[in-house]
Image: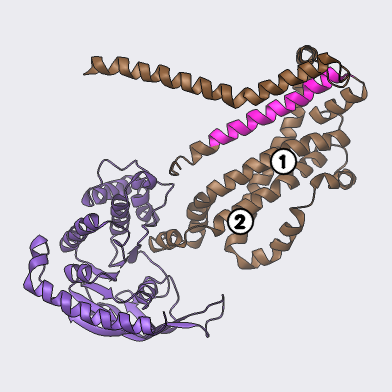
Amino acid sequence: MTADFGIKIEGVSHAYSSGQGQRAAGTLALKQTDLVIHNHEFHALLGPSGCGKSTLLYLIGGFIPVQTGSISTQKGPVTAPGPDRSIVFQNFALFPWKTVLENVMYGLQKKGLPDAECRDIAQAHIKLVQLSGFEQAYPSQLSGGMQQRAAIARTLAVDPDILLMDEPFGALDAQTRRVMQEELRMIWKRRPKTVVFVTHDVHEAVFLADRISIMSARPGRIEHQIETGLGLERDESTLTDRRFVELGEQIWRLVREQAVLASRGGL
Amino acid sequence: MAGSDIPSVSEEDRGSSVVVLAALCVRYLPLAIMLAVWELVGRSGLVSQQMLPGIGAIAAAFLDLLQSGELIVNAWRSLSRAATGLGLAVLIGMAVGLLMATRPMFRTFINPLVRILYPMPKSALIPLVMIWFGLGDASKIFLIFLGCLLPVIVSAYNGARGVNPFIIWSASSLGASKDEILREIILPAALPDILSGCRTALAFSFILMVSSEFVIAKDGLGFLIGSLGDGGNYPAMFAVILSVAGTGFVADRLFGSFASHRLRWKEQA
């Protein structure tokens, strides 16, 4: 069953209950969201904070159950987390008691691969994210940027169809963030995957993505979809590209509208 | 380059060993002061030598007990009871605490029991346990087990509840099953809390070991303290009391270095 989409989101609404257990009452995070993300597309979800973009990502990941509507991938409807949809979080979420190598090997061991093969694949991915030499280090001994590289290696090593990224560079300093963006785009170019990248940084979205969805203020919905059309290659020169600058301004205006709405909504 | 490195390294070593020695002196200074005051009070005649035997007399009694084998035999009896009770408590307490944190039904059922049993002094149960389990090892082991169980349960529960949910999500998106998440993610993530609960339990095991042997035993260190006291052999009684304190101290230190080795992945705060 080869569908022509990477991820299909149809009529998804999501309400968070303020208490525990009850679903019905509470804040509506997403309202009737529809979105089709193409296969092997680098897709950015952009919106003001609290617009439900992370909620949408967690729903795709299967971490929280779909209440209304449906989400499907090439593997069928999403019901639970799985290694076909691996995720990178803002706070890295490495296993702090495992070394870098053990962290990257974990998902491979869950696939039931023999130990030697796990080790080889893990080493290759550690090299890919330029962490060679730090295999035996514990996460607490690494800088934020290095921890996030390790988390990306751990996620890529299981070779997911879909890569979910939840503001992965949000906790990094500006220089490290820039380097990581370029490296991520380079890695993606070599190993194309469907990527859903959540961010509130307009330039990050434009620099990285093929297509950008701008979400409305809460309750979130996809308000605009924009093709960046910046081509496959992204590097330093992209930043001064006229289209990059124009897109940045255009998208910034659209996001700003939503942010203003959000602040008027009493958030 | 190597030639210039060597002397500087050894100098540093000498410097750091002096610092370590000084730190040790400062750390044990209060202990030395206490011993000195003890000796002086005894000699001054303010308190009779009967009540507070001199350190020399205690040391002599200690050597006697050691040579006769009385101390070793009873210590072995006591410590094997404590170790059995503590070991069972750690295994079962960890399982109960982790299940409470991850299975709401189980928590609802167990939580009231834990809340009631935790603050209750376990030594209050000694007469009851004597009726249940008789005068043998089982009664002492049960009391030690019960006393050690609750700090382990509570620490495992709190540790498991406090695990960063994103770590659990990461594991599940890497293909870990519910069971694997409990064993391979929640357990090691909760280990810092669990180990500190075990350290509390270790201290409890010594307290309950001695107090239960006071009341129900024909051997063991608690029994020895009681019978030496009854016989009026105070230097020997003090020697056993100090042996218990010393053993407890060493056990705590050993556990502490085991724990910091296991938790070497934690950032040095």
Tag 2: amino acid: Tyr
Report in which chain the residue with disc 2 lies. Answer: B
Residue receiving disc 1: B204
Taking the spot 36% from the left edge, 80% from the top edge, the residue there is A71
Looking at the picture, does residue A251 appear above or below residue A61? below
- Which chain does purple denote in the image? A
Tag 1: amino acid: Phe
Taking the spot 47% from the left edge, 82% from the top edge, the residue there is A27
Which segment did they paint magenta? B233-258
Mark 1 crowd level (few <14, some 14–19, many ≥20, 10 Å Cα) = many
Q: Is residue B158 left or right of residue B227?
A: left
> Which element is circle 2 on?
helix
Looking at the image, tell me whether mark 1 or mark 2 is earlier in sequence order: 2
Q: Is residue B136 left or right of residue B147?
A: right
> Which element is circle 1 on?
helix
Residue B103 included in the magenta stretch of the image: no
Quadrant where the N terminus of chain A sits is: bottom left
What is the x, y in percent for residue A166?
A: 33, 67
Taking the spot 36% from the left edge, 72% from the top edge, the residue there is A54
- Which chain does brown denote in the image? B
Q: Is residue B183 left or right of residue A7?
A: right
Viewer-proximal residue among B105 and A229: A229
Residue receiving disc 2: B157
Residue B243 included in the magenta stretch of the image: yes
